[in-house]
């Protein structure tokens, strides 16, 4: 171990360069591979050398809509190796393999007291950056992890767990939060609309809660991937009326709960129609403000409930870590494409225009140094 300025580095394993590569967002649908400074860290902070970072739909929406100012470096499903630690950091050492959350709430405000953590002002501050306005930073060689994330949002990766498996901790947490919001009872029937990687995750977690699963997707290829995870009862939405088929499978009632794991608002009405009277509908991917057509009588007269869930819950952090690190689900099977950082723009382009066989896409700066 050696000291470089105000922080400790692993002098045996790696020399930290002055500059690095990063996928920099410069405007609407404009991301460029650029050379930028490696971020400096202060007391209580850490520098992570990124191995893998999952491409998330929320980042794609920010890029495609221009909802956030430029420049920024996105990416928040980040796993890697501690490259340096700031003064006062004792829980982690250079060389430790870790995964980091990018949002952690204060724990004290009105919203935290009411368990609505995603509305906490501190939670809305992003605690990881590769430069510019903090935006996650995982699409870069190095990420600066700020002090409150070091203290409460960093998780050590066991030796037997891969960086790829570990980078699912945050998305698993968000899915667990959504399933908790549905308040499922054992034996209930759940319809999940959309079987991309998040839809499959939500389905597996709903089954874990004791539900009977019916899945649907326009792409038969995705339904076939779901069978690997035991999701056998599926509906090919390209050929079959989903609502009609669900009612056939539920004695004419409809599903007890419906999960909408597809972005946009066009399928909200379908999801509501697929739910039985008194059932619940979880909107999981509707993250853009806008307007949607709903049947108000379905809520009032049929007593159906619309439920929303967004981002992660600190209360579920340990459960999500156990799920991932104990390999309750082989999450690497959800990965369809791996791109080195040098091909990050191609990765984002594919993720923004998914193909039937494309599932989780990773950008892997670590492919150059760790395989």
Image (cartoon, helix red, strand yellow):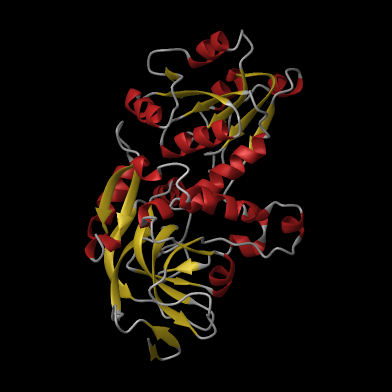
295 above or below 16? above
Along the horizontal axis of the image, is 347 left or right of 95?
left
Res. 73 visible in picture: no
149 above or below 61? below
Q: Split into 4 quadrants, where in the image is the N terminus?
A: bottom left
Q: How many marks?
A: 0
Residue 100 vs residue 139, the one in the foreground: 100
Say which residue appears at 48% left-offset and 49% top-offset.
Answer: 326
Q: Position of residue 105 (x, y in %)?
A: 64, 62
Q: Quadrant of residue 149?
A: bottom right
Along the horizontal axis of the image, is 243 left or right of 234?
right
Q: Position of residue 96 (x, y in %)?
A: 41, 71
Q: Split into 4 quadrants, where in the image is the C terminus?
A: bottom left
Say which residue appears at 45% left-offset and 89% top-offset.
Answer: 6
Residue 92 vs residue 7, the one in the foreground: 92
Along the horizontal axis of the image, is 257 left or right of 170?
right
Q: Quadrant of residue 255?
A: top right
Q: Position of residue 7 (x, y in %)?
A: 44, 86
Q: Position of residue 47 (x, y in %)?
A: 42, 75
199 above or below 33? above
Say which residue appears at 31% left-offset and 37% top-offset.
Answer: 358
Say which residue appears at 39% left-offset and 55% top-offset.
Answer: 161
Residue 328 vs residue 344, the one in the foreground: 328
Res. 335 visible in picture: yes
Residue 333 vs residue 54, the one in the foreground: 333
């Amino acid at each position: 171990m050696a000291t470089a300025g105000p922080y400790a580095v692993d002098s045996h394993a790696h020399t930290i360069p002055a500059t690095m590569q990063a996928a920099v967002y410069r405007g609407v649908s404009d991301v460029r591979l650029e050379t930028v400074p490696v971020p400096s860290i202060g007391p209580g902070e850490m520098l992570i050398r990124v191995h893998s970072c999952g491409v998330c739909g929320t980042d794609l929406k920010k890029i495609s809509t221009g909802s956030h100012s430029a420049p920024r470096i996105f990416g928040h499903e980040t796993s890697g190796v501690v490259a340096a630690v700031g003064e006062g950091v004792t829980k982690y050492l250079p060389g430790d393999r870790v995964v980091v959350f990018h949002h952690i709430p204060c724990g004290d405000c009105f919203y935290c007291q009411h368990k609505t953590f995603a509305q906490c002002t501190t939670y809305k501050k992003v605690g990881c950056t590769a430069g510019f306005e903090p935006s996650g930073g995982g699409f870069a060689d190095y990420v600066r992890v700020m002090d409150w994330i070091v203290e409460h949002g960093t998780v050590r990766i066991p030796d037997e767990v891969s960086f790829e498996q570990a980078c699912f901790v945050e998305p698993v947490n968000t899915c667990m939060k959504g399933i908790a919001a549905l308040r499922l009872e054992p034996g209930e029937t759940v319809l999940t609309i959309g079987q991309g990687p998040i839809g499959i995750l939500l389905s597996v977690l709903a089954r874990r809660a004791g539900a009977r699963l019916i899945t649907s997707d326009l792409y038969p290829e995705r339904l076939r991937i779901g069978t690997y995870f035991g999701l056998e009862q599926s509906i090919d939405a390209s050929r079959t009326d989903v609502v009609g088929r669900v009612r056939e499978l539920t004695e004419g009632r409809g599903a007890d709960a419906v999960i909408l794991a597809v972005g946009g608002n066009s399928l909200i009405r379908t999801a509501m129609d697929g739910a039985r009277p008194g059932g619940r509908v979880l909107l999981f991917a509707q993250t853009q403000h806008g307007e949607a057509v709903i049947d108000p009588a379905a809520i009032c007269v049929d007593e159906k409930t619309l439920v929303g869930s967004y981002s992660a819950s600190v209360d579920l952090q340990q459960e999500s870590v156990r799920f991932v690190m104990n390999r309750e689900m082989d999450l690497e099977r959800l990965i369809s494409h791996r791109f080195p950082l040098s091909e990050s723009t191609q990765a984002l382009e594919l993720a923004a225009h998914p193909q039937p066989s494309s599932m989780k896409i990773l950008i892997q700066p670590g492919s150059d140094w760790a395989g």
